[in-house]
Image (cartoon, rainbow, N blue to C red):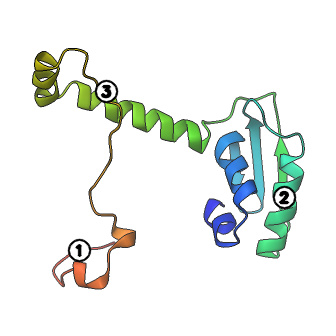
């Protein structure tokens, strides 16, 4: 869904989905979500209308405050980042640095490993197993 919105340059709607949609049920043609704090009241209607326009299929998009959905994409990203920072803070090299530089802390962690989706064909050898 995020890719569909990205491909159509629906930046505002994409941002709202990332920040406010806590999915409960997501199947082809149906999305039920619980709203995160600050969710626009018309998000379900706008998203359903836009998905119908993009896919040409009927979509049922509805919000429910009765059931707690999963985390939003933004919440998952923050959680992953916090876990990466915690792991870095506990690394022996970082511990040594913190001994030498009192008050030092890890504020940012970046994953610099190659992403298969962004690799150019020359980066992949014939022997690489890609599924």
Residue 31, image x, y percentages = 76, 51
Judge depth for marks 2 and 1 and give the one in front.
Answer: 2
Q: Is residue 60 visible?
A: no
Q: Residues within 10 Å of mark 3 (few under 14, many from 20)?
A: few
Q: Residue at x 77, y 32 (%)?
A: 38
Is 7 placed above or below 18 here?
below
Is 113 placed above or below 76 here?
below
Q: Residue at x 79, y 65 (%)?
A: 51
Query: What residue is pinned by disc 2?
Result: 48
Question: Considering the numbered disc 2 on the image, is that residue within a helix, a strand or a loop?
Answer: helix
Q: Between disc 2 and disc 1, whose residue precedes?
A: 2
Q: Locate the C terminus by quadrant.
A: bottom left
Q: Residue at x 52, y 39 (%)?
A: 76
Query: What residue is pinned by disc 1?
Result: 129
Residue 79, image x, y percentages = 46, 33
- Kindly report the distance in space between the C-alpha atoms of the residues bearing marks 2 and 1: 39 Å
Q: Residue 36 vs residue 58: left or right? A: left
Judge depth for marks 1 and 3 and give the one in front.
Answer: 3
- Kindly report the distance in space between the C-alpha atoms of the residues bearing marks 2 and 3: 38 Å
Question: Considering the numbered disc 1 on the image, is that residue within a helix, a strand or a loop?
Answer: loop
């Amino acid at each position: 869904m995020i890719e569909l919105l990205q491909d159509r340059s629906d930046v505002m709607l994409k941002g709202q989905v990332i920040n406010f949609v806590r999915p409960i049920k997501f199947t082809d043609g149906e999305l039920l979500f619980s709203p995160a704090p600050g969710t626009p009241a018309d998000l379900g209607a706008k998203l359903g209308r836009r998905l119908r326009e993009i896919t040409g299929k009927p979509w049922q998009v509805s919000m429910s405050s009765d059931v707690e959905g999963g985390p939003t994409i933004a919440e998952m990203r923050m959680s992953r980042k916090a876990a990466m920072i915690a792991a870095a803070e506990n690394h022996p090299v970082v511990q040594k640095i913190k001994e030498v530089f009192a008050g030092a802390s890890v504020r940012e962690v970046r994953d610099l490993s190659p992403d298969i989706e962004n690799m150019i064909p020359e980066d992949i050898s014939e022997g690489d197993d890609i599924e």
